[in-house]
Image: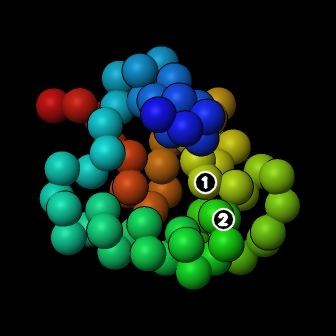
Amino acid sequence: MSEKQKDIQFYLDKFNMQVNPDAQIADAIRKRVVKCNGYCPCVPERNDDTVCPCKKMREEGHCCCTLYVAKA
C-alpha cells in the first residue's frame, strides 16, 4: 500500500467512511481527480487544501464529490 493510500485509509477509518460502493461513480470521480492532477474536481481552486482527499474531508469527514461516503 502506498503512502497516499495509507493516508486515505486513515481518514476513511477516522470518519467511518468508505470509497463509494457504486463502482461507476467512484471510477468517474477518480478519473476526474487524475485529470485535475490530484486535486478535488469539485473545487475550482488548486492548493494544499484541495488536494484529494481535500481539507474538508480530512478535517470534517465530508466529501463533496461523493468519492468517499459514510459506511452503511
In terms of secondary structure, where does tag 2 sit?
Answer: loop
Contact between marks 1 and 2 (CB within 8 A): the answer is yes
Q: Is residue 61 visible?
A: no
Considering only vertical position in the picture, is 6 above or below 44? above
Considering only vertical position in the picture, is 21 above or below 8? below
The residue carrying pointer 1 sits among few (fewer than 14), some (14 to 19) or many (20 or more) residues within 10 Å by Cα, namely many
Q: Amino acid at mark 1?
A: Cys
Q: Find the distance from the CA under tag 1 to the CA under tag 2.
A: 5 Å
Q: Amino acid at mark 2?
A: Tyr
Q: Position of residue 3 (x, y in %)?
A: 61, 34
In the picture provided, is 32 more to the left or to the right than 25?
right
The residue carrying pointer 2 sits among few (fewer than 14), some (14 to 19) or many (20 or more) residues within 10 Å by Cα, namely many
Q: Position of residue 20 (x, y in %)?
A: 27, 51
Q: Position of residue 36 (x, y in %)?
A: 63, 76
In terms of secondary structure, where does tag 1 sit?
Answer: loop
Q: Residue furthest top?
A: 14
Residue drawn at x 49%, y 76% is 32
User: Which color scheme does this rendered protein use?
Assistant: rainbow
Residue wearing tag 2? 39
Say which mark, if any, is on residue 31: none
Considering only vertical position in the picture, is 7 above or below 52? above
Say which mark, if any, is on residue 52: 1
**Foreground residue, 69 or 36?**
36
Q: Position of residue 27 (x, y in %)?
A: 31, 68
First in residue order: circle 1 vs circle 2: 2
